[in-house]
Structures are given as structure tokens and as C-alpha cells.
Image (cartoon, rainbow, N blue to C red):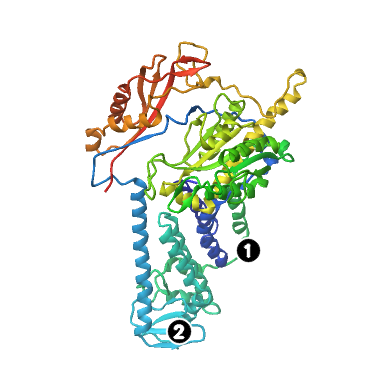
Amino acid sequence: MILPIYIIKTVFISATLLGYYWIFLRNRFFHGFNRYFLLGIPVFSLMIPSLHLSIPAFWNQAAGGSPIHLLGVGSGTFEEAITIYGPRKTGGVLSWEFTGLMISAGISLYLSVRLYTSIRFLHQLKKQNPSLPLPEATLFFVSEKGTPFSFFKSIFWGQEMELDNPEGKQMLRHELFHVKQQHSLDILLLEIFSILFWFNPFLYFIRREIKAIHEYSADAYAAAGSDEYAYAKLLLLKVSGTSHSLTNPFFKNQIKRRIAMITNPDKSKKDLSGRIMFLPLVAVLICLFSFKIQNHFNLLKNKSIRVVIDAGHGGSFTGAGFNGMFEKNINLDIAKKIRSLAAEYHVDVIMSRETDVTPGSNELRESLEWIAALPKNKNADLFISIHTNSSDDAQPGKPQTSRSGFQIYIPRNTSEVYENSVKFGSIMTEEIKPDFNIESELKQAPDEGGDILILKKATVPALLIECGYMDNPSDQKYLQDEKNQEKIARDILEGIRKYGTESAVYQMNAISNESLPDIKTPRFPSVNYSHLNENLNDSAAPLRKVEVEASYPGGNAAWGNYLFKNLNYPDEADRKKIQGDVVVEFVVRKDGSLTDVHAVSGPVVLRTESVQVISKSGKWIPAMDHGIKVDSWHRQPINYRLKQG
């Protein structure tokens, strides 16, 4: 869950519950209930949005069969972003996230210092003044204004005040009630909440109401068995009060409301409706913010989807590494989370490995062959390989921030499972997108090389999911958190279940259509996604999907070197402190020339430089499709960043 969205949810829940209190509970005589209700508001507001609950299948039958938006498929090579840094050496641009974090930390620090100062002042009062021990508390005789007031088991009593007269005994009785009920603990807890979550304005109203309830209950205790009007008159003896927010002062704390409560002839506590009706309200809030609607049918309730989960690398093959942390371990942690939660989603998980070993064989290619054969050997329906990314130019111990987030790779369009992998990957992207940054286009795996062999030889719909970048400090910290690993696992499992649901619905429709007895229904449906090549039937139109991608002479490394050498940070952008991401599209013709070079996104001042440099890149090696040269589209992201510090 994105932090700003979580904050908005907590504030909304706080406002809703406080509004309920204001309408149905405020100034009523069930003080104990109101006290704990108010203390529960910040707890509920933080807890409810963090819950991940699932609606039972029988509540959500109508949700199945919803249309799936199929994503485009791009090259997994030429669409890697190039980052160009501006010449600025000092006075770098601070991100809004960092600025906001610093402001928040500054406010929290100020509130912490204020709390410490108040506690220290009260401690000094105790040290510098005479005291009188009592069975329940200790009296300290002080010259401070606003006495008497209490803090935990300390009661601060005015030096000029009498203890033995009737008024003094009532005031002492009042303060002793605060001590016995531990009202200072309530205030201290709310102070801590206010320090950590100062941005929630409703915490301040809650703290004010808690103090009023403390006084109501202490007044009722102190005035019991005596003249209520005489006690009310006692409250008006002084109008000054202590300025310390941690204490329970006898005078000035909402005097008008306290007198109204004391002298109110109707002190009935029998109004149960206001206290009971908050339960449906909490249930509604949990439904709104904790449940994630699950798209599945009763058809799947007793039938599990069988999935091979491959924890990438293992043993001597560590994968990406950064600051002593290895990819193989993160991959295994996420895979284990998926397995531990799988039963909730009616998913049967087959692990490629459960410990730090190279699965199948200690020789890399044999191991990959063994993993690729698992779905067929174990009669699995789907295959997912869990990996963690690293930037191409990663350097040991040197972090980067230009690349972040998830990517999903699928087999190439020559694979028999390509079509269903497109659908599987599209569904998985939509499930991951609300919680994590993920590329909106699927990536085709190259024909050769390392771990992608498991996609090249896939026999069932298959995905390779790159879960963030090891060399990005923010991604790495996120991946190390066990709660975040659970979020990743749940999103992947939900994507598996949703894909299985769509396939099951397809089967049900086909089976029930008796007029088509000769149609053989596949286990998972084929998908018509010809719209991904918008002009597929127009032989003159450039293709977006080809068997062999066009390439720059010398390959990826030469293309990257060309861009780094020729792209310059525009002076105007540097002067105006403009940063941004530009995406350039262009067509590689059959003769290798480039046409239709244009920027589809990014700040205007940065687009011209990008288009100009790519236009001058010279002849390319054209794409091949069905053995012939074809015109094809390409896309190149370019990130422009100003140097900091």
C-alpha cells in the first residue's frame, strides 16, 4: 500500500469514528465507555487499512468473468531506460518525498522536545518542593499556578490551599480518582500518537475530549453524596489553570461543560443504542478498507490451481548482490511466503527449491532445463519464476536511484504458450499495480541467455517476475521487510487465482454450449489479442510485434554508448531545474533507416534533444518476421536527472 493512500485512509477512519462519537456519545453519562471508545479511534484508524482480508467466494460470484485488459508486449532489451545526468554539481533538486519526510521528522522532533520539556518540568517540581506521602499517591506542595493537578501518582497541591476543609477534601478526592484510574496514561499515549501521526488533525480533538471525560468521571466521584450545586460553585473559585498539557488540572478544564454535567438532573446510563451501533460502523469500515474483492467462482472452491514457483538462482549461483545481500535469498523468502499463503487462494504450490541449493543439478544449464520441465513432470497449470533485478551498469557497493519497481517477462511470440502468457502477465500486472510500481508493458524474453531459458522452454503459461532492484536502496529496504514480502506474495497469488477464474469461466461457457460438441476446450483459453498489432492486416504498416527485433549495429552496448556519448542535458532544462522521463518512438524501416521519430511523453524542453539524437543514429539492422525484413516500431525511454550535492 502506498503511504499517502494509507495516511488518507487513517484520517478518514478517525474522522468517521469521531463524528459518530460527537453525534451519539458526547456529553453522555457512560464515561468509561466513552473513554475507551476515544482511545480506540487511533488504534482502529491505523489497524483497519493494514488488514488484508478476503471476501468469501459465495459472496462474490457475480464478479467473475470481468473483461481483462491485455497489455502490450515490448522488447526486453531496447526498452531499457537510459539515464542522462545534468551538469549541475551543487544545489541538487530534493525530491518531494525526501522534503516531506524531513518536514514530518522536524515536526515530530519539535513535539517530542515539547513532551520531554513538560515531563522534565514536572520532575523538577517534585524534586524542589516538600511532599506528603499518601496511600494512593504523593502530595507535592508547590507555588505553581493552576493547582491542584495530577500526573500519574503525583498530585501537585497549592501551598496556600487547605487540605482539611470540605472543599479541600473534595478536590483531593477528585485528584485521587485521576490517579486511581491512570488518566495520565491516556494523555501520554495520545501525546505519543500525536508525535508520530501529527498530520491527523482529529487526534487533537480526541485528546481534548479524553480530558473532558476524565473530569466528568472525577467530578462524579468527588461530588457523590454531597450537594451538586455546591460542588459546581467550587469549580468557579478559580479561573486560572496549568499550561502543561500532560496534567489533569482541577480548575479551568472545560468548566462550563463540567458544571452542566454535574447539575444535569437526567443522569441515565441506560441508552444502549449509541454504544451498540458503533459495531456496525466498525464493520462497514473494515469492509471498505480491509477487504480485497476476490474474483473467483464456487467452481474453483474445491479445485486448486497447480503452480510451479521457482525461487530464482540458489546454491553457488547467487544472482544479483548488493551490500552483502544476495538475490537468491530474497527470491526464496518470497517463494516461501507464496507457499505458506497459497491454501487461502486455492493454489497448490510446487517449489523448485526450498533451501539454498541449485535445483536439479549443480551445472547451470542442466538446472534450468530441470526447472523448465517441472510443470510438465508435476502436471502443473502455471509457472512463475521469482527474481530480483539489478541495473545493467551496477557497481559493487554503489547504489542507484534511477531504476526501481517490478517487471514481468513472458516467453517470446514464437512460443506455444505466448498468448496465454500475455493474458496471465496482464492479469498479474493489474493485481500488482495498486501496491507496487510496475512497468505497464510486458517484456519478451530474449532467445538466449541464462535464466530466460526457463521461459524459452515453457510448456504452460509462464512468467518471470523481477521484484524490484537490489542496487536501489529503497527497493532493497522494501524487499527485506517480511510484511512487504507478504504483500508481494498475496498479489501474486491473487493474480494466479484471477487467471484461473477467467479460465474456469471460459471452460464452463464452452462445456454448457451443447451446440458445439466438436470443439475441444483447452485447459486455459487462447486469447485474441491481434489488436496489439493495430495494423496487422496492413502489410505496409510497421509492426509492433516481430520474431526478431531490429537492432543497432554492435548490439545493446553500442546503442547505449551512442546515447551516452551524444545526448546532452539541455541548458534551458538545467537552468530551470527541469527533470523528467522522455519516451521516444520510432520506426526502423526494411532498409535500416529511421522514420517517424517522435516523443510520446516527457517535458517539452527535453523532448527535442531526445528526438534529434535518435534521428541521427544512422542505419539499423531491420527486424525479421516469418523470414523476411519488415518495418517495425521501437520505443526508447530516456531519464533526465540533475546531479545532487
Drawn side of residue 563 relative to residue 31, left or right: left
Secondary-structure class at tag 1: loop
Mark 1 vs 2, N-terminal side: 2
Instruction: Note whether 513 is above or below 557 in the view shown.
Output: above
* Res 399 seen here: yes
In the depicted view, which residue is nearer to us: 6 or 303?
Answer: 303
| Rendered residue at 60%/65% (across/down) | 269
Left or right: residue 280 compared with residue 624: right
In this rendered view, identify the residue nearer to me: 174 or 88: 88
Q: Residues within 10 Å of mark 1 (few under 14, many from 20)?
A: few
Above-or-below relation of 179 to 18: below
Q: Secondary structure at mark 2?
A: strand
Q: Which residue is mark 2?
A: 138
Q: Residue furthest front?
A: 363
Residue located at (54% from left, 60% from top): 40
Spot occupied by residue 627 in the image (x, y as percentages of width and height):
51, 15
In which quarter of the view is residue 418 placed?
top right
- Assess disc 2: are there few (<14), some (14-19) or many (≥20) residues with their C-alpha within 10 Å of its C-alpha: some
The mark total stands at 2
* Residue 157 percent location from the top left of the image: 40, 82
Q: What residue sits 41% from the left and 39% below the top?
A: 392
Q: Nearer the viewer, residue 198 or 386?
A: 386
Give the residue type that dot 2 points to: Thr
355 left or right of 111 in image: right
Residue 283, percent from left and from top: 61, 51
Disc 1 from disc 2: Cα separation? 37 Å
- Is residue 285 positioned above or below 519 on the image? below
Amino acid type at mark 1:
Lys
Please indicate, yes or no, whether residue 266 appears anywhere in the rendered image: no
Q: Which mark is residue 270?
A: 1
Of marks 1 and 2, the one in the foreground? 2
Against 105, residue 462 (above or below) is above
